[in-house]
């Protein structure tokens, strides 16, 4: 699936994000396309290779309303807290 600038996504372990840019960087193995993601509610920007999106488990949200509703969902919050604890080794 191809994402576009201003698409809202869920990013496991980080929460809800927005695609802010799509760019190509020249690496040693040739050009690689990247998404720049801004995580909502945090001062965090992530660059993710386009080819890695499916591996990480990033999912598309259909818009701002769905993103706001996802943040309020108890299931989303529970999974986020559990993931954060595992990542910190608690």
Image (cartoon, rainbow, N blue to C red):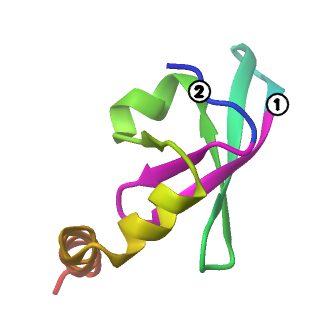
In the rendered image, residue 3, in percent from the top left (x then y), is placed at 61, 29
Q: Which mark is residue 70?
A: none
In the rendered image, residue 52, in percent from the top left (x then y), is placed at 47, 30
Q: Which tag, 2 or 1, sits closer to the chain's start?
A: 1
In the rendered image, residue 43, in percent from the top left (x then y), is placed at 68, 78
Q: Which mark is residue 23?
A: 1
**Can you say whether 16 is above or below 74 in the image?**
above
Check contact, mark 2 vs mark 1: CB within 8 A.
no
The crowd level at tag 1 (other Cα within 10 Å; few <14, some 14-19, many 20+) is few
Residue tagged 2: 50
Name the residue at 35% across, 77% down.
72
Query: Disc 2 versus disc 1: distance between alpha carbons?
Result: 10 Å
Which residue of the protein is positioned furthest toward the top in this rendering? 30
Which residue of the protein is positioned furthest toward the bottom in this rendering? 90
The quarter holding residue 59 reads: top left
The segment highlighted magenta reads 6-22
9 left or right, relative to 37:
left
Magenta stretch holds residue 58: no
Which is more toward the observer, 10 or 47?
10
Which is more toward the observer, 63 or 60?
63
- Which secondary structure, mark 2? helix
In the rendered image, residue 69, in percent from the top left (x then y), is placed at 40, 67
Name the residue at 51% across, 48% down.
9
16 left or right, relative to 57:
right
- Which secondary structure, mark 1? strand
């Amino acid at each position: 699936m191809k994402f576009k600038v201003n698409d809202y996504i869920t990013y496991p372990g980080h929460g809800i994000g927005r695609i802010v840019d799509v760019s190509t960087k020249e690496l040693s193995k040739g050009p690689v396309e990247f998404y720049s993601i801004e995580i909502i509610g945090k001062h965090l920007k992530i660059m993710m290779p386009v080819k890695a999106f499916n591996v990480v488990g990033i999912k598309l949200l259909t818009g701002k309303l769905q993103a706001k509703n996802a943040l309020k969902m108890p299931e989303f919050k529970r999974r986020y807290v559990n993931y954060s604890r595992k990542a910190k080794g608690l």
